[in-house]
Amino acid sequence: MTQNGRSGRLAENVMHFARVLRTAGLPIGPDRVLDAVRALEATGLERRDDFYWTLASVFLDRREQFDIYDQAFHIFWKDPQLLERAMAMLLPAVHGRTPEDKPAASNRVSEALKAGSQSDKRPGNAEPEKIELDATLTFSAREVLQRADFETMTIEELAQAKAMIACLRLPIPEVRTRRFRPDSEGARVDLRASLRASLRAGSEVIALKRRSVRYRHPPLVVLCDISGSMSRYARMFLQFLHAITNDRDRVHTFVFGTRLTNITRCLRHRDVDAAMLEIADVVADWSGGTRIGTCLREFNLGWSRRVLGQNAVVLLISDGLDRDAGEGLSKETERLHKSCRKLIWLNPLLRYEGFEPRPAGIHAMLPHVDAFLPVHNITSLVDLARALSAPAIGERRAA
């Protein structure tokens, strides 16, 4: 790196590195490249750690971008453990991929590096080292894409998945209300309507007006975990909720990490990108810790009476990993369950065949839910729609 800097190649290398990060999905423009070069001139190139954190301070805005930056840095700037990292990316997997520590970032970074190597080569290297990273996993057919885990998708696959999610709908069955509607073939006689009609006509013969029970879709309330372990799943599920919010009425969405935030108005934007940008401005605890019991208590005290009326259905999206070790979680989950018609828990950890509810948070919540379903790919979202459209399946209480 020092030699590149002395030979005038530092700015070019930083520019090429920024292109890789931008291809991998990080919002990096020319202004940040110039700032990075100035910052490196100020900090110097004597220590690799200083070089690493100087670029990180300029290029990164959010915590969830760090995984992509870390892998791209060690590959681009010749990490001594490059071979081990490259081999870890190519391990065999179910449906083409197995969730590892940082699989999604690996696919995105390898895709960005592959695209960059095809367009131009880094200056300062006469014969760049030949490395093939995940070259066979850059495209998925529709069937494979539906089963692919959101954590392991590349940039192209994420775009395709978002387009498919935008077409999904959530068919919640209609429930009977206490109100009636005019119906000529109804089983009940509407005496008031019959008397009003007879007074208007002035006839001695009264034509009976009838009515029937009115059915309506119940409100849908969503509580989505946005902690660090749920970040990527939460982003994809918010895309799904945006499509639902613009397709039907009475959808209320809340996100929680260390605090509870109402994002219902944000999701009402017709443009999904504008909705996501507004959510990013409103939510302050994205990819942080998790205090499920505290957030559920805040919802039960401040919001349950406003949004849980008329047989509301509640979707709780969380992995159940609570920082407070499940303190007060059983009580608050029970209260939430008693306040709604149906409580459905969607947990991405159910994608593992040997999953057991050992964490304290999962053990405390599980007895108080009506259904316990996975949510980690498009197929799981389709299964959720089927479960809601068949009440007999969802009504069975999870053990």
Image (tube, helix red, strand yellow):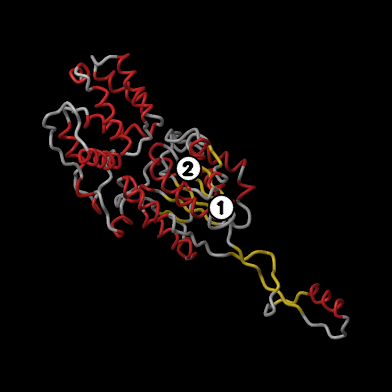
Q: What residue is drawn where x is 40% and y is 59%? A: 382
Q: Residue at x 71, y 73 (%)?
A: 182
- Nearer mark to the viewer, of 1 and 2: 2
**Left or right: 214 as drawn, with respect to 12:** right
Secondary structure under tag 1 reads: strand
| Type of amino acid at the residue the image marks with label 2 | Met
Q: CA distance from mark 1 to mark 2?
A: 17 Å
**Whether label 1 touches label 2, CB < 8 Å:** no
132 left or right, relative to 202: left
Q: Quadrant of residue 145?
A: bottom left
Is residue 19 placed above or below 192 in the rendered structure? above
User: Residue 6 location in percent, x, y?
Assistant: 20, 16
Give the residue type that dot 1 points to: Val
Residue density around tag 1, few if under 14, some if 14–19, many if 20 or more, within 10 Å: many
- The x, y position of residue 271, in whole percent, is 50, 48
**Label 2: few (<14), some or many (≥20) within 10 Å?**
some
Residue farthest along the bottom direction in this orientation: 205
Is 236 left or right of 1, judged from the image as shown? Answer: right
The picture quadrant where one finds residue 27 is top left
To which residue does mark 1 refer?
251
In the image, what residue occupies the spot 38% across and 27% down?
31
Q: At numbered mark 2, what does the secondary structure look like: helix, strand or loop?
A: helix
Q: Which residue is mark 2?
A: 276
